[in-house]
Image: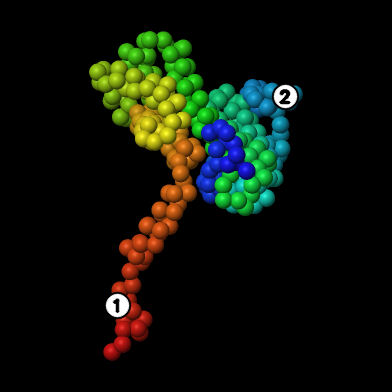
Amino acid sequence: MAESSPTRWFAPVPARRLDLVRAATFGYAVLWLVVRARYVWDVAGLPARRFHPIGVFTLVDSQPSRAVIMGVWAVALCGSVLAASGRAVRISAPVGGIGMLLIASFTSSFGQVFHTEHLLVLHLLVLAVFMVVDDSAGEDERTGWALNLMMAIVVVSYVVAGLAKLRFSGADWLTGDVLRNWVAADNLRKLLLNDLHSPLGGWLAGVEWIWPPVAVLTLVVELGAPVALTMGRARLVWLASAWCFHVGVFAIMAITFPYQLTGVAYLAFLPVERIESFLRTRVLSNPAWRPAVRPSWLARRGGGGG
């Protein structure tokens, strides 16, 4: 059992925490697959000349047919539904995780790599491996390496994003001009294409003084991500800052990171079993949350006497 592990990486965590993270992560995958079903269908019908394979699809010689892709989509959906509900997880979790890897890689093989989906796929694959190798089902505690690895992946993704900004623009990023021009150009392009854009971002592009601190804060959040691997307030401060960062991106560029904005991406960092317990005992059981039955309603049903 995990109690004998000498390292913090394999330290035991409540089994309920892992169950909740698994359910939420695969549940999010279910929603993603359902919401993006039409998009997957449309992409699968694009001509072969548009197909520029990435990832696992670099191993195939030609573009898979629409029937094959939608079959993979259906299998991924079924696997994710079962994994989210905790059924046959040693089979359903790998099926759902690998299915999502294939679908996300395929849709990113047509001109734009959607990095917003990479974190989700990596988390699914970590959970899938854990469900296969874990032998502590039914016990109160399990080894925490899966959650720690999920946290490490989140941290690395932010650090890489910060380093990419510095590699792209160097110290000029700190002046704010690069970010300001980026926001302005992105919103202008969307406006010309009649796409969703941010009027706030377009207005702020004319406010010169605000961009240097915003650019610095962006790097602080991204390069400061390793503090999330510590415990206590530092972790909570970074999680709140990262979430606010994505709110800001949506506000000024109309770019969404739904996995992060919903909070599912950060669940591995949190004692979610305690949050669940609080909601059950303090919120859902509170009489104030129960629908009030008014005497006048009972009277109309004949229960008021008279």
Q: In front here: 111 or 215?
A: 215
Amino acid residing under circle 1 = Pro
> For residue 11, what is the image quadrant?
top right
- For image coordinates 37% across by 18% down, the residue present is 179
Q: Above or below — where is 12 with respect to 165?
A: below
| Quadrant of the rendering where the N terminus is positioned | top right
Comes first in the chain, label 1 or label 2: 2
Q: Is residue 235 left or right of residue 121?
A: left
Mark 2: few/some/many CA within 10 Å (<14, 14-19, 20+): few
- For image coordinates 53% across by 43% down, the residue present is 13
Q: Circle 2 — which element?
A: helix
Q: For the residues marked 1 and 2, what is the alpha-carbon distance in whole angstroms?
A: 70 Å
> For residue 143, what is the image quadrant?
top right
| Residue 265 locus on image (x, y percent) | 49, 37
Amino acid residing under circle 2 = Leu
Q: Above or below — where is 132 with respect to 160?
A: below
Q: Is residue 169 left or right of residue 153?
A: left
Mark 1: few/some/many CA within 10 Å (<14, 14-19, 20+): few
> Any mark on residue 59, and which?
2
| Residue 156 locus on image (x, y percent) | 51, 25
Residue 258 in view, yes or no: no
Residue at the spot of label 1: 295
| Residue 172 locus on image (x, y percent) | 37, 10
Colour setting: rainbow
> For residue 247, what is the image quadrant?
top left
Farthest right residue?
61
| Quadrant of the rendering where the C terminus is positioned | bottom left
